[in-house]
Image (cartoon, rainbow, N blue to C red):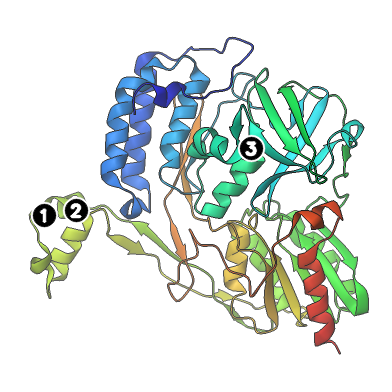
Amino acid sequence: MKKFFLLMLMPLLSFTQSNKLSKADKIYGLSKLWQEVNYNFVYLNKVDRIKWDSTYKVLINTIPETKSDYEYYRELQRFLAMLKDGHTDLYMPAGRDFEPLNTKFGDYRLFIENVAGKAIITRVNLSKKEEIPIGSEVIEVNSKPTAAYISENVAPYISSSTDYGLRDISISTLLQGLDGTQFKIKIKTPKGKVLSFTLTHQQTTETEVFPAFPSEGKLLSFKWETKGIAYIALNSFTDEKIDSMFVAKLPELYKAKALVLDLRSNGGGTTGIGSYILKYLTNDSLLYGSRYFTRQLNSAFKAWGKYTTAKDTVNNSWNAKALLTYQDNYFYNFDYYPLKNDLSAKRIVVPTVLLIGHNTASAAEDFLIYADNQKHMIKIGQNSCGSTGQPFLFDLPGGAVVRVCTKKDTYPDGREFVGYGVKPDIEVVPKVEDLINNNDPALKKAIDFLSKKLK
């Protein structure tokens, strides 16, 4: 971990980036980050502390030499990514120097997603749909195979709680860079033809893309499928308006014989917003959500713990607390209360499929925990994101903001889902052919499943 730790493989930029932060600011920001993680990060007991601390020591010497403020913040992102937590990361300051482009390359616009483990182009600007067919795979970036480029240039900077989440984000941000960043790529079309492109990030004026984004890309969307099956997508719990939008659909939903509830695009928000909707979908008077834990530091116990051994803790709760505190492994268990469901309105308790996927995150996962014991509900799709919690936010010199996760969530019985995801009862993994043919295999499976239930 020499100086190449800072400079390796950063794509060339066509303009000079600002370097306004002093060396003292950069060291202070690094040390502030390291300190707050050590004090507040709830999963510190899962961190390789020797590697974490030794990396910090290296960065003390190397990070003041970063050539720009952007590069400095990128190295902090790389440092935080070692913690492998989706709620522990760094947000760049606002401004041109820090806002990377992802899909825009002047005359071209490319959207890339992880489909069956490959970097697949899922959308392009409309004028390029013949030149770059949908379903084409990015096989090489800057003279390196895509997997190698991701491993060296992309994944090390991404904070993710799961391996599959890391792959998804790495692929979707494969060509991310500041205005002026250049990439040389090779793609392989669905017919096997290999094409080469040199792309430079700049604004794309063409607004139409192919295929067009769904018009229902909003908070809530509703439609009828076959045989009285109602489909409703809950795309976010960030805005409480979705609760009133759901209530407005009740007259139609009461006619449903079965329900598909799509949470695949729901990245979370506020847990109470989602649980309000769930109250309409169960007859239970109590709903059991996540249990919460946070690290608890008592400085005196930490001092005593330094002189405490494992044998000292036998039948001695005082010593046990001291040793655990010294090891940064003593947790405060929040009081647990199930959520009362005293809703007076009519409920919708019919066979229900919850569509879930890697983008079902945070408060949407809390929704799944509340729904876990509902016998009329089944989950179809892929593992959820596997990341939730309560971040502590603090500022760094220059305007960056860091989040550090302070709360551990589990199922009511203690099972962990952070780092693993909520698993579907029936797994459906999309294929490249589904993308090309505009198929939604998870929704098809849901409708087939519910149709059989209604026979």
Along the viewing direction, whichever of 118 and 52 lies nearer the viewer: 118
The residue lying at 85 percent from left, 65 percent from top is 248
Residue 11 against residue 188 in the figure, above or below:
above
The residue lying at 81 percent from left, 60 percent from top is 245
Within the image, what quadrant is residue 332 found in? Answer: bottom left
Q: Are marks 1 and 3 in contact (CB under 8 Å)?
A: no
Residue 326 tag number: 2
The residue lying at 40 percent from left, 65 percent from top is 334
- The residues bearing labels 1 and 2 have C-alpha atoms spaced at a distance of 8 Å
The local crowd at label 3, few if under 14, some if 14 to 19, many if 20 or more residues have their Cα within 10 Å, is many
Within the image, what quadrant is residue 207 found in? Answer: top right
Mark with earlier residue (1, 3):
3
**Residue 56 x/y as whole percent:** 31, 32
Residue 173 tag number: 3
Quick one: SS at disc 1?
helix
Q: Are marks 1 and 2 in contact (CB under 8 Å)?
A: yes
**Residue 73 x/y as whole percent:** 48, 26
Along the viewing direction, whichever of 431 and 439 lies nearer the viewer: 431
Quick one: SS at disc 2?
helix
| Residue under pointer 1 | 304
**Residue 197 x/y as whole percent:** 75, 26
- The residues bearing labels 1 and 3 have C-alpha atoms spaced at a distance of 47 Å
Along the viewing direction, whichever of 313 and 356 lies nearer the viewer: 356
Query: 116 left or right of 128?
Result: left
User: Could you tell me if residue 395 is visible in this image?
Assistant: no
The residue lying at 43 percent from left, 56 percent from top is 407
Residue 145 tag number: none
Quadrant where the N terminus is found in the figure: top left
**Residue 325 x/y as whole percent:** 22, 56
- The residues bearing labels 2 and 3 have C-alpha atoms spaced at a distance of 40 Å
